[in-house]
Image: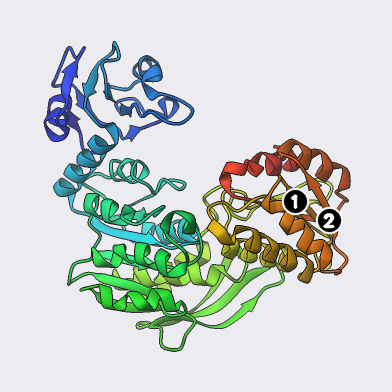
């Protein structure tokens, strides 16, 4: 964060100062929307959510070191009062970017955004000062918060960009215009809000490449026809990544190691180098290639990129996060979110990890699947059976029951159980688990199965 006075911030966002003794007081630390995360010298943005009103925590934030509160009403402590806190955060982020001008990289996709962002950040950090999205702060609040962590020394700004509906990426790229845009894939995440199928999702995701300048780079997945269809929507130069032979950044000789990790030969215009990822699942190859494509257009050589990928580790919780218990049970927490594509990837990764060990799937609902929801849950249940999982625990009413019914009717020998809620899942899984089992816990985040994974892991 570049130091700015309260008076300067007020001018940028159109705020009025309330209960401010010193308009020249400096904000020197990043902003936060959680009062518990405000750093001394930072700015607390008081947003109103479904469960809490940040204005109620304004005094605590200031007591904890916040210089002031960005608020929509006076709060009895130093405040910059605006009509719309979210809009004001965006304006402040845009102002900061105009002052420091780092290389802005935007990335989007239906699955793999956060893992790719984490891989890319670890590659770029070895090259120059990098700021990347924290966790999955990829929306209209999270993106400005990421931008406001940058300062004059930041060379690369890696912004994960989520799209819940059409127009979201247009808004986000308006706040932080990218020079490089990476599109990973098009799937069924958020299809309920975007339209009827992948074509509607592609229309929304393609807003990223439409925002790129003519001297920028659009990095498109050569293996995804919906992503390739975006080529005609951008002025930018195009570079392809993927396993296809036509991709300039591609993987050859892909193989699984005995630890369910993926190894491959990374090929870029600068040469080739071996990569072995410390992440489980073959689907991670696509994520790594996306990161490699960005690093390539930013001028990094293949050896440096491969070194960064080889050294990279999982950073974000709830994404194929592995915990080994003392009794030999392995808990794989992939409960941050779920859609049909990530369910398939998670199930296959866990089977590869398990080898001959017994496998248990604790699965909840996949949200925002529109009219196809029941069919997609049934498809997941059939995959559980086809992959020969030993146990399925389907959590919740409605669509998870379709998952259970499909798995049971497949007659592949999977033991199918249903429970009403997360607490029931914890109780049943605890009773059923045997030493040496490998357990996948996965559902959309609103189901709350992360708590189940943590309980089973003993956290």
Vertical placement of residue 59 versus 447, above or below: above
Label 1 element class: strand
Badge 1, how many Cα within 10 Å: few under 14, some, many 20+? many
Task: Determine the image quadrant of residue 126.
Answer: bottom left
Q: Position of residue 78 (x, y in %)?
A: 25, 16
Vertical placement of residue 189 versus 305, above or below: above
Q: Position of residue 256 (x, y in %)?
A: 66, 75
Tell me the quadrant of the picture where the N terminus can be found: top left
User: Which of marks 2 and 1 precedes in the sequence?
Assistant: 1
Q: Nearer the viewer, residue 248 or 194?
A: 194
Which labelled disc corresponds to residue 394? 1
Q: Residue at x 30, y 71 (%)?
A: 218
Q: Residue at x 59, y 63 (%)?
A: 340
Label 2 element class: strand
Q: Position of residue 312 (x, y in %)?
A: 51, 60
Circles 1, 2 touching at the beta carbon (< 8 Å): yes
Which labelled disc corresponds to residue 416? 2
């Amino acid at each position: 964060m570049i130091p700015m006075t309260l008076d300067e911030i007020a001018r940028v966002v159109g705020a009025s100062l309330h209960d401010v003794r010193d308009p020249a007081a400096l904000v020197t630390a990043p902003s936060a929307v959680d009062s518990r995360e405000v750093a001394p010298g930072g700015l607390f943005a008081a947003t109103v959510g479904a469960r809490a009103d940040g204005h109620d925590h304004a005094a605590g934030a200031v007591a904890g070191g916040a210089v002031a509160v960005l608020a929509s009403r006076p709060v009895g402590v130093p405040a910059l009062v605006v009509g719309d806190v979210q809009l004001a955060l965006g304006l402040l982020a845009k102002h900061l970017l105009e002052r420091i001008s780092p290389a802005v990289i935007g990335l989007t996709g239906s699955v793999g955004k956060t893992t790719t962002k984490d891989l890319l950040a670890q590659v770029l950090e070895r090259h120059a000062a990098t700021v990347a999205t924290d966790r999955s702060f990829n929306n209209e609040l999270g993106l400005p918060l990421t931008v406001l962590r940058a300062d004059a020394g930041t060379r690369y700004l890696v912004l994960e960009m989520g799209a819940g509906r059409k127009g979201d990426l247009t808004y986000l790229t308006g706040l932080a215009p990218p020079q490089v845009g990476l599109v990973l894939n098009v799937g069924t995440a958020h299809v309920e809000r975007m339209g009827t199928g992948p074509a509607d999702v592609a229309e929304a995701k393609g807003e990223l490449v439409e925002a790129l300048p003519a001297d920028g780079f659009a990095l498109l997945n050569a293996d995804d026809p919906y992503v390739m269809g975006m080529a005609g929507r951008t002025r930018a130069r195009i570079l392809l990544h993927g396993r296809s032979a036509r991709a300039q950044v591609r993987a050859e000789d892909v193989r699984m190691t005995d630890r369910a990790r993926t190894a491959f030969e990374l090929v870029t215009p600068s040469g080739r180098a071996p990569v072995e990822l410390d992440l489980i699942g073959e689907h991670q190859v696509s994520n790594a290639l996306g990161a490699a494509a960005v690093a390539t257009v930013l001028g990094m050589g293949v050896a440096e990129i491969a070194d960064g990928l080889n050294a990279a580790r999982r950073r974000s919780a709830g994404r194929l996060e592995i915990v080994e218990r003392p009794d030999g049970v392995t808990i794989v927490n992939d409960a941050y979110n779920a859609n049909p594509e990530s369910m398939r990837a998670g199930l296959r990764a866990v089977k590869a990890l398990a080898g001959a060990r017994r496998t248990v799937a604790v699965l909840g609902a996949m949200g925002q699947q529109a009219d196809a929801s029941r069919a997609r849950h049934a498809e997941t249940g059939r995959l559980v059976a086809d992959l020969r999982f030993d146990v399925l625990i389907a959590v919740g009413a409605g669509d998870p029951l379709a998952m259970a019914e499909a798995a049971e009717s497949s007659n592949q020998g999977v033991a199918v159980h249903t429970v009403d809620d997360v607490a029931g899942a914890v109780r049943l899984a605890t009773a059923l688990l045997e030493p040496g089992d490998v357990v996948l816990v996965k559902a959309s985040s609103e189901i709350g199965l992360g708590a189940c994974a943590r309980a089973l892991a003993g956290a």
